[in-house]
Amino acid sequence: MELHSDEYFMKQAYKEAQKAYDEGEVPIGAVVVSQNRIIARAYNQTEKLNDTTAHAEMIAITSAAAYLGNKYLKDCILYVTLEPCVMCGGAIQWSQIGKVVYGAEDPKKGFMKYGKDILHPKTKLEFGVLSLQCGAIVQDFFQERRKLKEKINH
């Protein structure tokens, strides 16, 4: 695997998703890349921070903007393991990220349900990178939660 490939950076986002999984958070991870360097890493922390907006993408965007000292991320690429929701799609638009690459689709809550127009017109979009792996960790997480709930209810 090439060092600066989409697969490489998605694997880095996947490592963040694994941290979320290990902490009992919905396992979604994100990294922001600028000039082939990761400048921000994040994972879902909605439970930990008791904040419904603490999605991996939101935290990564905030961190990248702070790192660059600029609210616009035009020359950056956001890698995220699951298709962003509408809220995150809005943040992606406002930050004017140059490109978004996501792994697994989210047909229920993903922004694509509403169309690519949610993103900034100049934002490029790519998806399906490591989609099986990125989708499996989310499925495993929710299967584990359901089994745990069943045990508690019986």
Image (tube, rainbow, N blue to C red):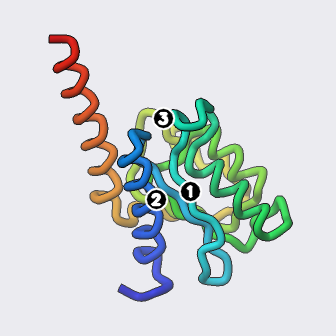
Whether residue 125 is visible, yes or no, is no
Nearest to N terminus: mark 1 or mark 3: 1
**Mark 2 residue element:** helix
Left or right of residue 87: residue 73: right
Q: Is residue 81 visible?
A: yes
Q: Look at mark 3 in the image and give the residue it sits on.
A: 109
x then y, percent, for residue 67: 76, 68
Question: Could you tell me which secondary element the residue under label 3 belongs to?
Answer: loop
Q: Quadrant of the N terminus?
A: bottom left
Residue marked by disc 1: 42
Circle 2 sits on which residue? Answer: 16
Earlier-in-chain disc, 2 versus 1: 2
Mark 3–mark 2 Cα distance, whole angstroms, equals: 20 Å
From the image, state whether disc 3 or disc 2 is nearer to you: 2
The image position of residue 79, as x and y in percent, is: 53, 63
What quarter of the picture does the C terminus occupy? top left
Q: Nearer the viewer, residue 43 or 112?
A: 43
The amino acid type of the residue labelled 2 equals Glu
